[in-house]
Amino acid sequence: MKYEIRQEFDASAEQVISAMMHPDVAAFLTQHMKSLKEMELLERTETDDTIVRRVRYRIQPVIEKIGPKKIPPEAFEWVEQSTFDKRRRVMTYRNVPTKSKIARMFENHGEIRISDAGARCARVMSGELKIHFPLLGSVAEKMIYKKAAEILEEEATALRLFMARR
């Protein structure tokens, strides 16, 4: 399933990018988001043109079952592998589950574009989510997308608070 989520901020693109990439943002988001149990920066490499990151996330479970199949809590832990292009203001990402069994069933990748919109800025996340599960995969995709959109709205609210306190 393809998706697009658009969010707007009362800040410049540079301010939003700076907040998203700030070394303290993981601890702040974990503290200010009910859905986020853990966020850990595993790796960060910055050059003049890019920021490459690996970030581990663990969220509150968003679904309990797909049909009769119970979903274990570890299904909701993954590592974001991302590259942010500073000049284009585009982050490409791939979210890889930490458990191999889950990784075989789950694919999520896409990009985040951040652009100025007058005195504000827009953050547009687009990508693809695939659940490889017979018959019920598309149902799970829709459920996961709905919860992910809610979590991203919660993250945007916490990010706004982070920027206001800096």
Image: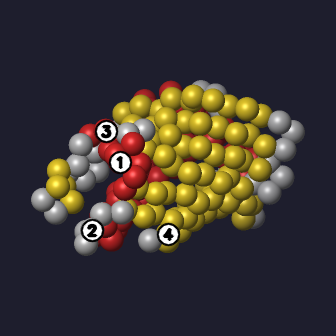
Judge from the rendering whether residue 118 lies leftward or rightward of residue 58; answer left or right.
Answer: right
In this orientation, does residue 35 appear?
Answer: no
Residue positioned 71% across, 47% down in the render = 84
Residue 93 shown left or right of residue 14 in the figure: left
Count numbered badges in the picture: 4
Residue closest to the eye, 51 or 132: 132
Is 127 placed above or below 106 here? below
Residue 60 position (above or below residue 138)? above
- Per the image, the residue denoted by label 2 is 134
> Which amino acid lies under the numbered mark 4 shown in the image of this protein?
Tyr
Residue at image location 49% in from the left, 35% down from the top = 56
Task: Identify residue type, mark 3.
Answer: Glu
Tag 1 residue: 102
SS at circle 2: loop
Q: With 30 as the anchor, is 81 left or right in this view? A: right
Q: Nearer the viewer, mark 1 or mark 4?
A: 1
Please name the residue shown 55% across and 57% down the image: 109
Q: How far apart, in angstroms, are the residues tagged by discs 1 and 4?
A: 21 Å
Amino acid type of disc 2? Pro
Q: Between tags 3 and 4, which lies in front?
A: 3
> Residue 22, how many percent across, how many down?
66, 33
Q: CA distance from mark 3 to mark 1?
A: 9 Å
Pointer 4 residue: 3
Sequence order check: which comes first, mark 1 or mark 4? 4
Q: Quadrant of residue 153?
A: bottom left
Residue type indicated by callout 1? Ile
Residue 112 x %, y %: 63, 57
Mark 1 lies on a secondary structure that is helix
Residue 25 rendering spot, x and y as whole percentages: 57, 32
Nearer the N terminus, badge 2 or badge 3? 3
Under tag 3, what secondary structure? helix
